[in-house]
Amino acid sequence: MKKTTKATSFEELVPDEELREKMKAHLYAKKSLFGEGSIFSDLLQTAVNGMLNGEMNDFIEEERAKDKSNKRNGHTKKVVRSMAGPLEIQTPRDRASDFEKDVRAVRQDLRAVYTATTRSAAELAMEAFDVKWKSKYADIAQSWRRDWDELMAFMDYPPAMQRMIYTTNPVEALHRIVRKLIKGKAAWVSDTALLKQLYLSLQHNEKSWKRKANGWKTIQRELIKLYGDRISKHLHDD
């Protein structure tokens, strides 16, 4: 009799209940899972910050084992660009500033993982990271391995499409226009008044967001290859 394998549940794949509910809400609303403010962005940001905190805990324990009086000293916040959009990374600090030196070196090795264009290239980069850092930063290596399938979902797209997903400049430009308008005025007399002002503002700043994507012809071909008529029926000859 053939043995059946039990399917992994959604709860097992995503243990964090808050993130799980947010993912469901995104999917039901048909929102993108990639890009700025997306679920993938949240997952990557949470994973990186969680790993850094775990490594700081281990680092402080090692310092105490060496009879050093080193302690935590808050966090250094930094926004970094990634394939999933901007991430707010909170790097723990120690009073002797020794931990951050290692973190900078670790980030350089990990950069080779998340900037790889294929899963195999990312796997090779991860193996190289393991060789150099796993013995010292086991939590980081284990965390990347544990969430590997989720983190590598991005690699399922061709290189040109990957660049389009994480290069969000036109989207960010549009968001800046909207935020500037909303922050400059507390209220509108009606929803229609707001929509009219948004429309006029976007039209006035059209050059900042209405432009062709770099390598669009290549991306078009890849989209048609992946999704067929779902894409081609909406395209027109230039």
Image (cartoon, rainbow, N blue to C red):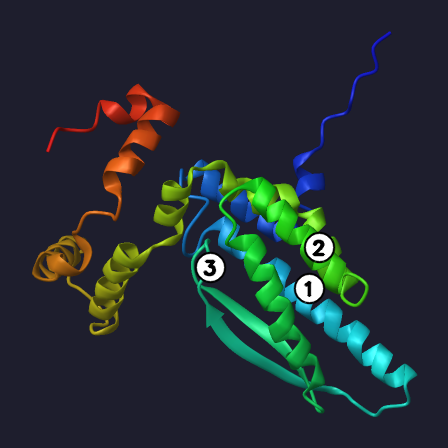
Q: What residue type is disc 1 on?
A: Met
Q: Nearer the viewer, mark 1 or mark 3?
A: 3
Residue 51: image tag: 1
Q: Which residue is mark 2?
A: 143
Q: Which residue is mark 3?
A: 82
- Marks 2 and 3, Cα distance to the nearest angstrom? 18 Å
Q: What residue type is disc 2 on?
A: Ser
The reply to whether discs 1 and 3 touch (Cβ–Cβ < 8 Å) is no
Quarter of the image for residue 108 reads bottom right
Nearest to the observer: residue 169 or residue 18? 169
Q: What residue type is disc 3 on?
A: Ser
Nearest to the observer: residue 237 or residue 21? 237
Quarter of the image for residue 44 reads bottom right
User: Is label 1 in a helix, a strand or a loop?
Assistant: helix
Between discs 2 and 3, the one toward the N terminus = 3
The reply to whether discs 2 and 3 touch (Cβ–Cβ < 8 Å) is no
Crowd band around label 1 with a 10 angstrom C-alpha radius: few (<14), some (14–19), many (20+): many
Between discs 1 and 2, the one toward the N terminus = 1
The reply to whether discs 1 and 2 touch (Cβ–Cβ < 8 Å) is yes
